[in-house]
Image (cartoon, rainbow, N blue to C red):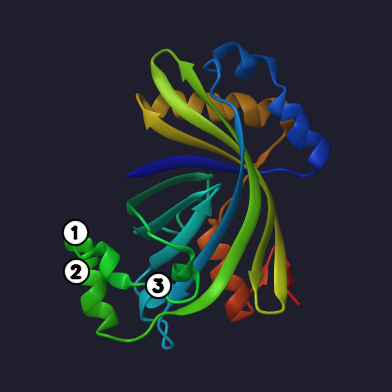
């Protein structure tokens, strides 16, 4: 299960301040800092059967590494910025998956079999992409291990685009209460608002032409 906090970042300057935060630096694991280019493609059937079942099918390139991921359950629950979702990730062989993904990469899991049954042999098509730079590092707070990620980039759905500028704090091991305590401390220090929508949910809203943050995306 993936458990994480998400916060909106108002400006690039604020993001850089968080990156240099003294509290985070004091609990950061040595040599854990990395900057990674991320490109993700989200797929569904023409009739959006996965979306209708709140399933996200994603192929993502993380630097030189390709990963296929299924996520499901409570994709839009993050009203307070806290997300808890089930996921399965598997390595992917080559870049051709960005054009023609093979849903059978998940066949060895029960959830993958359920996804294959829902797809029922239909082809998967690209519905939207995300392209962003992630600056990340691990922290250790009283035995709770988390990853801090600062993301900047955009979501692309046809001719519609929306910027990505957010902080994620993902729980790797330890206490969810400690995760929330860390999030509250950083949010309070920088007046951060929770991000109530995941990247998947924001991409979904873009392709459906729904209103986000009080205006309709063009």
Give the SS element for disc 1.
Answer: loop
Check disc 2 and report the residue beneath it: 113
The disc at residue 109 is 1
Q: Quadrant of the N terminus?
A: top left
**CB atoms at circles 1 and 2 under 8 Å apart?**
yes
Give percent across and percent down for residue 65: 47, 49
Task: Say left or right for 152 vs 194.
Answer: right
Q: Residues within 10 Å of mark 1 (few under 14, many from 20)?
A: few
Give percent across and percent down for residue 126: 51, 77
Check disc 3 and report the residue beneath it: 101
Give the SS element for disc 3.
Answer: loop
Q: Nearer the viewer, residue 68 or 54?
A: 68
Q: Give the foreground label among 3 and 1.
A: 3
Q: Residues within 10 Å of mark 2 (few under 14, many from 20)?
A: some
Q: CA distance from mark 1 to mark 2?
A: 6 Å
Give percent across and percent down for residue 151: 65, 45
Q: Quadrant of residue 55?
A: bottom left
Q: Is residue 147 above or below residue 45?
A: above
Q: Earlier in the sequence, mark 3 or mark 1?
A: 3
Give the SS element for disc 2.
Answer: helix
Q: Is residue 99 above or below residue 139?
A: below
Q: CA distance from mark 2 to mark 3?
A: 16 Å
Q: Give the foreground label among 2 and 3.
A: 3
């Amino acid at each position: 299960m993936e458990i994480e906090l998400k916060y909106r970042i108002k400006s690039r300057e604020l993001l850089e301040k968080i990156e240099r935060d003294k509290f985070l630096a004091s609990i950061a694991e040595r040599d854990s800092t990395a900057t990674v280019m991320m490109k993700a493609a989200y797929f569904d059937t023409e009739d959006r059967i996965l979306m209708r079942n709140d399933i996200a099918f994603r192929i993502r390139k993380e630097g030189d590494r390709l990963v296929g991921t299924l996520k499901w359950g409570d994709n839009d629950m993050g009203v307070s910025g806290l997300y808890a979702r089930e996921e399965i990730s598997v390595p992917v062989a080559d870049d051709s998956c960005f054009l023609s993904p093979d849903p059978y990469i998940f066949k060895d899991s029960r959830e993958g079999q359920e996804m294959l049954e829902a797809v029922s042999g239909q082809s998967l098509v690209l519905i939207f992409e995300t392209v962003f730079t992630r600056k990340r590092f691990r922290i250790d707070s009283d035995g709770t291990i988390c990853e801090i990620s600062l993301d900047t980039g955009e979501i692309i759905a046809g001719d519609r685009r929306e910027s990505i500028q957010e902080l994620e704090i993902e729980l790797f091991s330890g206490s969810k209460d400690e995760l929330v305590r860390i999030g509250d401390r950083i949010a309070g220090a920088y007046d951060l608002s929770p991000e109530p929508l995941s990247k998947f949910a924001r991409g979904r809203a873009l392709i459906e032409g729904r209103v986000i943050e009080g205006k309709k995306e063009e």
